Amino acid sequence: MTAEDEESTTPLEALRGYRKALWDEIDHFTQKANASRRYSNILQWTIIVGSVLAAALTTAGAASRSAQDARVIAAITSGVVSVAASAAGFFKYRERGFNEQMTADAIEKHRQAAELSIGEYGSDMSEEERLRLLATNVEIIKDDQRKRELQLEQKSEERGATQGSTGA
């Protein structure tokens, strides 16, 4: 698109383009939510299976004096569980996935309501008024999502700083 094309675009055309681009926004947040949930599930399964395995190996190592290998593997498994638990707590993939899916759902809800002229996008509004309201609401939703992301990052940074200063 050239500078001339941008200048010739009317506000209504720009708003229509914004509405079409919402599909990409919804897909973006849905994909991020799925990835975050996948990371969360992997870490949770690592913690669960690793904890059980470490306990079993520790018991096996204690039962037999010659089971040095079991003790070493138990120690390594315990370390992996600790790292996975720390990563899950620090990066908060579960919360991120929930927030991202909530954002995708909210954008989809507003897009659908504007398309059907229902709710706050009532049929007494012109197309341009509906699209302006849609754009305003979607930008508020996206801004709220950015704030939730920042809040999660700040909590993680605070926790990391606290652990670093206490030596934990």
Image: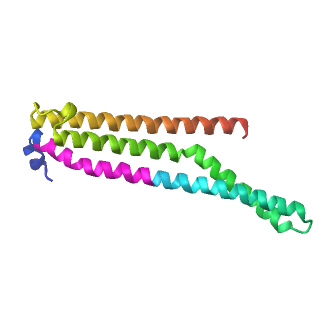
- Measured along the vertical axis of the image, is residue 159 above or below residue 59? above
List x then y, in percent, for residue 124.
10, 30
Of residues 113 and 33, which is closer to you in this image?
A: 113
Q: Is residue 52 above or below residue 25?
A: below
Q: Quadrant of residue 120?
A: top left
Q: Nearer the viewer, residue 58 or 119?
A: 119
Choose top left, top right, bottom left or bottom right for residue 77.
bottom right
> Which contiguous range is marked in magenta?
13-34
Could you tell me which residue is drawn at 13 percent across and 48 percent down?
3
Residue 12 magenta-highlighted:
no
Q: Residue at x 72, y 57 (%)?
A: 52
The residue positioned 11% from the left and 44% from the top of the image is 13
Query: For the view shown, which residue lies furthest in the right direction?
Result: 65
Give yes or no for residue 16 being in the magenta stretch.
yes
Q: x, y (%) of residue 46?
A: 63, 57
Image position of 19 (left or right of 66): left
Where residue 98 sits: x, y (%)? Answer: 45, 44
Left or right side of 111 for 144: right
Q: Is residue 71 left or right of residue 132?
A: right
Coordinates of residue 115 in the picture (x, y in percent): 17, 43
Quadrant position of the C terminus in the picture: top right
Judging depth in this view, the residue of 162 and 126 nearest the camera is 126
Q: Which residue does the image show at 81% across and 65% down from the upper left?
A: 70
Magenta segment's dominant SS is helix
Q: Quadrant of residue 66?
A: bottom right
